[in-house]
Amino acid sequence: MTMQAESDSQAIVETRLAHETHRLATGLLVDAAGRSTVPRQALAQLRDFAVANLRHHHETEDAWLWPLIVAAAPDTKRSLDELSEEHDQLDSALDRLASVDLTRTEDPGGDSGGESTSSDSRHALREAAVAVRDSVRDHLAHEEPILLPALRHVTSAQWEEFAQRVIAETPPVAGHLTIGFLDEAGTPAEVESMLANMPAPVKSVLPALRSQAAADLRVLRGDGS
């Protein structure tokens, strides 16, 4: 296997895993919003995580990755421009999801301590989450047949620089959930290779992040309290 092939393989693996985390996160948000037993804080955390990371992901594609691909393969520009238009459409769905007020509780007197959101808020959250989940699934079904082959035009050095830049700019919103979803999306070897470029301070606390993610995901899935 050549160095270029190895680079392409890593780029494809990391992209596929990132996409799968988006599918997992948005699907889980729909499911969790439909269960009245899931605490408000857990719902808000997952919602904020999904919104921040989806925005960051497609913004880095539009601003940084697409130009790399187009520079090497100009014939991909039209297809990538179409994908960017879909990103704009996804932004509208994300705006709606982000605007759902999860601070209203069932008990106006506040006896719930803010842990239980109102049924209207949960309904609004689930509807908005469904729109985002479906938009993400449709978009990725269109994007992956275009993007994954196109990543072979990105060199090893370009991909490493891009990945480092993405990591450095990743929003600090419930980052432990990324670890939890990655562990579900990929094999241990794939996840290890993707986390290899994480900053040393993050690597040192990976066990704690995994433990926190596992606990939070159990709550969201109704497997714990």
Image (cartoon, rainbow, N blue to C red):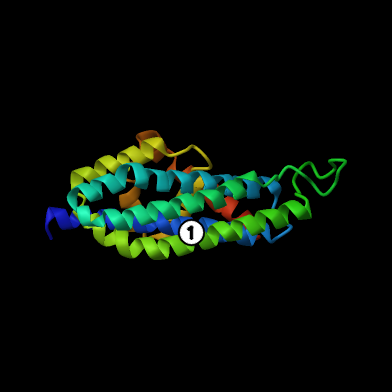
x then y, percent, for residue 155: 18, 48
x then y, percent, for residue 5: 17, 58
Q: In the shown orientation, is residue 32 left or right of residue 49?
A: right
Residue at 41% over, 48% down = 58
Q: In the shown orientation, is residue 174 left or right of residue 110?
A: left
Residue at 38% over, 57% down = 17
x then y, percent, for residue 41: 67, 45
Element at label 1: helix
Label 1 crowd (10 A; few <14 / some 14-19 / many >=20): many
Residue at 32% over, 54% down = 80
Judge by depth and name the residue closer to the eye, 88 or 15: 88
Q: Quadrant of the N terminus?
A: bottom left
Judge by depth and name the residue closer to the eye, 181 or 16: 16
Residue at 73% over, 42% down = 103
Q: Residue furthest right?
A: 109
Residue located beneath label 1 in the image: 136
On the question of residue 114 being in view, the answer is yes
x then y, percent, for residue 23: 48, 60
Tally of numbered discs: 1
Amino acid type at image mark 1: Val
Q: Is the residue 51 above or below the residue 172 in the image?
A: below
Judge by depth and name the residue closer to the eye, 130 or 209: 130
